[in-house]
Image: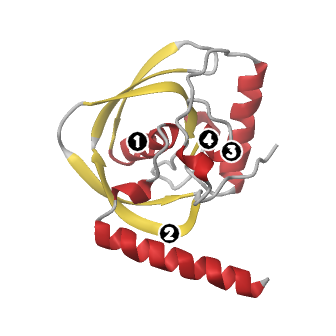
Amino acid sequence: MIRKIMTYPNPRLFLESEPVVEFDSNLHDLLDDMYETMIASQGVGLAAIQVDIPLRALLVNIVDENGEQKKEDLLEIINPEIIPLSEETIIYTEGCLSIPDFFEEVRRYNHILLKYQDRFGEHKELEAKDFLAVAIQHENDHLNGHLFIEKISFLKRQKFDKDFKKKLKNQKKAK
């Protein structure tokens, strides 16, 4: 089932998500719905809070070297813990399903160790670099009640706020 994605400035996007303790059919249904929602929205990641479920669960499914997004590459990440493996950072242009049509450069760790649980509660570890590391950190920020616009420079944030207010005003006029 495709769920509605909350969009900025919904205050629920800033909630800190709770750890998952029940690895049951409700969680599995949520993860399946999140996958359908993410794919339908042409995203590469989605956090549970974005569909108004404040649980520490997220998906990441980046495209492969052929530009294809395959379900077998899907990462279902529950209760993540991220450990930077070096101080090296990468600047990547990010977007967000909760902030449609806005993209900006963000600096993140380029190499991380991800400790997490899968949908069955099994503990896993994954080393991630480059865009995969960026996507995981972006989605994990959602679980902590943060959006990528908080990581952009003050001037770019001012411009975003101005453009966002203008967009809202135009939407109200169109109705």
Task: Tell me which amino acid carries mark 4.
Answer: Ile
Q: Contact, CB < 8 Å: mark 4 with mark 2?
A: no
Which residue is denoted by mark 2 in the rendering? Answer: 102
Q: Which of marks 1 and 3 is nearer the N terminus?
A: 3
In the picture shown, does residue 148 fall above or below 117? below
Which residue is denoted by mark 4 in the rendering? Answer: 49
Q: Give the CA distance from mark 1 to mark 2.
A: 18 Å
Q: Earlier in the sequence, mark 1 or mark 2?
A: 2
Q: Position of residue 4 (x, y in %)?
A: 75, 52
Between disc 1 and disc 3, the foreground one is 3
The tag on residue 137 is 1
In the picture shown, does residue 64 fall above or below 48? below
Task: Tell me which amino acid carries mark 1.
Answer: Gln
Residue 69 visible somewhere in the drawing:
no
Mark 3 burial class by Cα count in 10 Å: few <14, some 14-19, many 20+: many
Mark 1 burial class by Cα count in 10 Å: few <14, some 14-19, many 20+: many
Task: Tell me which amino acid carries mark 2.
Answer: Phe
Q: In the depicted view, which residue is nearer to us: 66 or 122?
A: 122
Judged from the image, the secondary structure of the residue bearing numbered disc 4 is helix
The residue shown at (33%, 61%) is 152
Residue 77 visible somewhere in the drawing:
yes
Judged from the image, the secondary structure of the residue bearing numbered disc 3 is helix
The tag on residue 51 is 3
Q: Earlier in the sequence, mark 4 or mark 2?
A: 4
Q: Earlier in the sequence, mark 3 or mark 2?
A: 3
Q: In which quarter of the image is residue 107?
A: bottom left
